[in-house]
């Protein structure tokens, strides 16, 4: 968070150790995990105030968002992205904050889409999708994931806390589908006592539509969402609830390290996913790294500190030096927060999800 004191590691001191942790030419961390997935947060702003992410009490009018000059420019993002691809990244997801609020996001998509061999996706709250879906597709975006926490307007408005109507998000999903940004994934964060009653209506609505609904356990990210364990609804309960009405069977992962556990409807109505980062940690296969809006690199969603890549970009370091720094950071990585979560760790000050990118 830009207003927290974060122990930043000076990556310049890491530059010489390029070869550490390389396996067969690919980067591996101290637990043998390969680097393959980069999430880039393009803005720390959002037009929603989801209760589990940017609660109004903290993200009010006076909230100290990043100044414009602190943001990575599109050219800086492209340069870093290329270097990550050289180091093994095969998938980039644009996120935020709300990524569609970043001015000319289509231009960034076009720039990134020019990198060969890359899967390029974006996660959005869907509020601006009707306006942007076509341009994003034209620019080379392959798919979108849309967050949606309920189908009934009253619950959805309570969850986004800015009185945003559900119909506009559904319309955005339709626009994305029409533009060819498919298959669309729909993410629902389940917060017990707030929107768990929306699970079945969501499952019924998305069944048979070719859009993949995924239920995410409410996580203790950041330091402001008032997370409590008893507000986490375990994915196993979600699956049980749906299975009782619409029988499910487990199916295998699409690729190694996929975070969602997949289930398909036995009657052929498609599939759902559950992401159980609290009750069934998947750190052992975590291949993700996150770049914050201001160019700090975080090797875990729950990190307390980042590595300042922007400083390298803005002090004239060569591609080789930056690539070496990336290699050194990943090689030294030992994160496994969700596997070792305790009452003490949940109370630690952590980076906010809207800044680091979900
Ligand atoms: N604004 C965009 C959106 O909402 O899709 C992108 C950024 S948002 C931080 C990315 C994802 O993180 C969303 O699917 C959101 O639901 C999820 N998320 C945010 N806070 C969370 C929390 N405390 N627990 C679980 N998921 C969370
Ligand atoms: Fe905004 Fe996404 Fe966070 Fe909701 S989850 S407040 S839409 S960044
Ligand atoms: Fe990856 Fe950290 Fe999440 Fe574990 S807790 S899966 S290491 S981001």
Image (tube, rainbow, N blue to C red):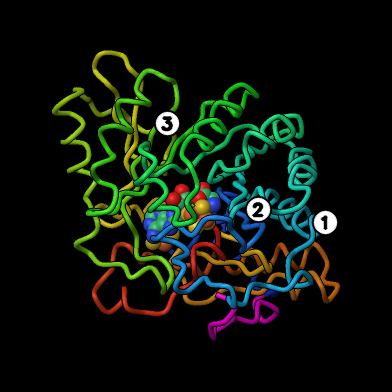
Numbered disc in front, either 2 or 3: 3
Q: Residues within 10 Å of mark 2 (few under 14, many from 20)?
A: some
Residue drawn at x 78%, y 63% as measured from the top left? 320
Q: Is residue 193 above or below residue 223?
A: above
Identify the image quadrant of the N terminus.
bottom right
Which image quarter: residue 32?
Answer: bottom left
Q: Secondary structure at mark 3?
A: loop
Q: Residue beneath label 1, please?
A: 75
Q: Which residues are magenta?
A: 1-14
Give residue 287's position: percent from left, percent from top: 48, 52
Which image quarter: residue 90?
Answer: top right
Q: Earlier in the sequence, mark 2 or mark 1?
A: 1
Give residue 140's position: percent from left, percent from top: 73, 33
> What separation in Å lies between label 1 and label 3 (alpha carbons)?
33 Å
Numbered mark located on residue 254 in the image = 3
Residue drawn at x 73%, y 67% as measured from the top left? 71
């Amino acid at each position: 968070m830009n207003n927290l004191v974060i122990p930043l590691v000076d990556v310049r001191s890491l530059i010489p150790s390029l070869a550490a942790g390389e396996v067969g030419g690919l980067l591996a961390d101290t637990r043998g995990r390969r680097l393959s997935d980069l999430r880039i947060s393009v803005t720390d702003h959002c037009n929603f105030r989801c209760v589990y992410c940017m609660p109004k009490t903290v993200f009010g009018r006076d909230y100290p968002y990043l100044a414009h000059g602190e943001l990575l420019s599109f050219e800086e993002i492209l340069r870093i992205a290329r270097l990550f691809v050289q180091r093994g990244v095969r998938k980039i997801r644009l996120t935020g904050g709300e990524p569609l609020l970043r001015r000319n996001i289509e231009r960034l998509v076009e720039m990134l889409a020019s990198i060969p061999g890359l899967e390029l996706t974006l996660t959005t709250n869907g509020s601006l999708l009707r306006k942007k879906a076509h341009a994003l597709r034209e620019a080379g975006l392959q798919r979108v994931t849309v967050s949606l926490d309920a189908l009934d307007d009253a619950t959805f408005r309570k969850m986004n806390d800015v009185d945003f109507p559900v119909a506009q998000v559904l319309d955005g999903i339709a626009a994305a589908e029409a533009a060819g940004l498919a298959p669309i994934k729909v993410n629902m964060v389940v917060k017990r006592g707030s929107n768990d009653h929306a699970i079945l209506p969501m499952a019924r609505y998305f069944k048979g539509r070719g859009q993949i609904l995924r239920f995410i356990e409410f996580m203790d990210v950041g330091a402001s969402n008032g997370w409590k364990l008893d507000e986490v609804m375990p994915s196993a309960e979600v699956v049980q609830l749906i299975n009782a009405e619409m029988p499910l069977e487990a199916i295998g992962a699409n690729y190694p390290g996929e975070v969602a556990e997949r289930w398909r409807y036995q009657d052929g109505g498609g599939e759902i996913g559950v992401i159980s980062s609290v009750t069934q940690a998947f750190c052992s296969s975590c291949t993700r790294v996150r770049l914050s809006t201001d160019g700090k690199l975080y090797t875990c969603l729950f990190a307390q500190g980042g590595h300042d890549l922007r400083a390298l970009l803005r002090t004239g370091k060569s591609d080789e030096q930056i690539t070496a720094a990336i290699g050194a950071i990943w090689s030294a990585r030992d994160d496994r927060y969700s596997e070792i979560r305790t009452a003490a760790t949940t109370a630690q000050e952590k980076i906010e999800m809207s800044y680091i990118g979900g």
